[in-house]
Structures are given as C-alpha cells and as structure tokens.
Image: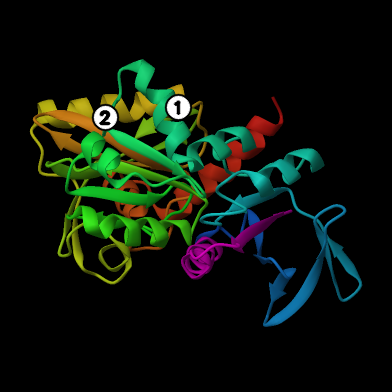
Amino acid sequence: MTQNIAIVMGGYSSEYEISLKSGQVVYKHLNRSIYTPYCVHIFKDQWVLVENGTEYPIDKDDFSAEINGTKITFACVFNAIHGTPGEDGKLLAYFELLGLPHTSAPSYQMALTFNKRDTLSVVRPYGIKTATSYYLNQGDVIDEAAIVARVGLPCFVKANRAGSSFGVTKVYEQALLQQAIETAFKEDDEVIIESFLDGTEVSVGVITYKGETTVLPITEIVSDNDFFDYEAKYLGKSQEITPARLSEADAKKVREVARKAYDVLRMRGFSRSEYILVNGEPYMLEMNTVPGLTEASILPQQAAHAGISLEALFDNAIQEALTAANK
C-alpha cells in the first residue's frame, strides 16, 4: 500500500512561481510504487489540493482534503515552499502541532536560518567567517556616512528575510544607498548591508542522507551580471560549474565550513549555503533551507554529481522525515 504525500508549494512571497516549479518536479519524480503524491497549493487566500485540474479545499483542522467523498490524509509533507510560510518555519510549526512529519528541519531551525542576520550571528562564534555588516529596521534613521564607514563601497544591500535575490542591490556610490534600502524594504522590514567580498563564489549543498550529514560536490558560480541576481539564477545568465574549479585544499576548507554550519545550526533535510572564497578562506553569506529542486537547480546538479538521482534524493527526504518523527 502506498503512502499519501502532500507536496506543499506556492507560498506568500515573491518566490511563489519558483516554488510551484520545484513542487512539480518533486511530484514528477516520486516513486509511484511507494508513494501517492498530491500537489497542495498554499496561498494567502486559499489552501487547495489540486488533482487533475480540480481544486479541493484543505481542511486546516487536520490538513486533509475530500475528493469525491473520500477523505485524503497524509503520511508526510514534502516542503517545496521557498520563502514564507514554508522556509521561515511558520507552516512547519503548524504541521508539528498536528504531529505530521515534514521533510524540513524543525520549525525553529527554519525560522533561524531564514533570517540572514541571526544565522550569521550564530555561526560567527564557531569561527565561521562572514562579511562586515550593518543592520537596519524599517523606521530607523539612515546614516549613509556611518554605513559606508563600516562596510565600505561597493557594498550589498539585502532584504534580511527573502530569497532568490529579491530585494538585493549592489551599491557603488553613497548617493545610491537610499534607493537600494527602499528596494530591500519592499521585501522585508529588516535590512542587512554587507561589505563586498572579492573572491570566488561557491554554493554547496549539505543534506541528511541515509542518516548521515552529507556534503555534496561544490558548485562554482560565475555570473554574467554584476552578481548572482535573479536573472543569473533563473534566466541563464550565469555559469554553474560542478564540481567547482578549486584546489583540493580550498575545496576541503569549504566542505568543512559547510558541514560545521549545518551542524551548528542543527539542521536536518536540505540546505544549500553560499560562500565567497577570499585568499583560501570561505566567508559565509547565507543558508537556503528550501533550495530550488528543479532539474536545472544547483542542489539537484550537485546530487547528480554525487550519484544521487532525483528519485533517490526525494525518497530519502521523506524517509528521513518519517524516521525523525518516530524517534
């Protein structure tokens, strides 16, 4: 007998379209001899199970749906929501209250890692290097001279809790800071401004695979644009080179730091962290805990190089979730 799996996708953020694509890939690659997958769209105005083009409302009392008089419940939820409420832990806390296993880390860890400021604050005491930063909350007085004095130019202005490079601007002149900050505040009410790091950008997936923390092959990011922005990530304006063109010594350092960050943050399930390698030292930028899962996305590319198919990758995530729920 197969197990019903709810693949949640969509979400409330600017990343919803990317999430829908990731969710569809998960749906396509789940082994039908083991699982019966269902696509569940989570939007602010509706939660619906979508089956053969028909939408069936989700009963939020127990996260079930009724199809032609039959009640559908789920053995596990596969989280494919980039951004809120999937990647920031809100939806996962609801599943945890229901006792429903899900494929992500516990809700607190997800909330922590979705917050760039807090993530970097936690890893720094463990010797993980980060860029020099300056924080702003919406409504704060913006002292442009103080910002430049701390982080220098050029610098990056980022929405603190957003993904896919939404709300990110590279700023070369102090006169352009205000506009960049306003752009970031459109995505979040917290902003992080970071110094520019001149080095090689790499991305590395770390997952829980067959019960073990597993570091996947490293990907080198070479953007055609000024940085790894939305176009570079999703519209083909970058090279994603796996495995990265690093010396073994540099690759070893990146792997060690990525594993340490995963363990320090007490992660489980998927993660993909971004680093800038400066003179052989990795500087952590952020951690993504619901990375893109399409065939062309970075983490699936890395898994493929490690000999892990999409079917095996997704099956493992579900099995890890079920195992964790039974401990």
Expressed as whole percent of the image width and height from the top left, the position of residue 95 reads: 73, 45
Task: Count neighbours of disc 1 (C-alpha within 10 A) and say few if under 14, some if 14 to 19, many if 20 or more.
Answer: few
In the image, the segment drawn in magenta is: 1-28
For this view, does 151 lie left or right of residue 280?
A: right
Which quadrant of the rendered structure holds the C terminus?
top right
110 or 183, nearer to the observer: 183
* Secondary element type, mark 1: strand
Q: Quadrant of residue 193?
A: top left
At 69% from the left and 73% from the top, the residue drawn is 50
* Secondary element type, mark 2: helix
Reading the image, the residue beneath label 2 is 255
284 or 202, nearer to the observer: 284
Reading the image, the residue beneath label 1 is 212
Q: Is residue 283 above or below residue 70?
A: above
> Residues under labels 1 and 2: Cα distance?
15 Å
For this view, does 7 lie left or right of residue 304?
A: right
Expressed as whole percent of the image width and height from the top left, the position of residue 175 reads: 23, 58
| Residue 297 seen by the camera | no
Residue 12 part of the magenta-drawn span: yes
Residue 152 part of the magenta-drawn span: no
Q: Which mark is residue 276?
A: none
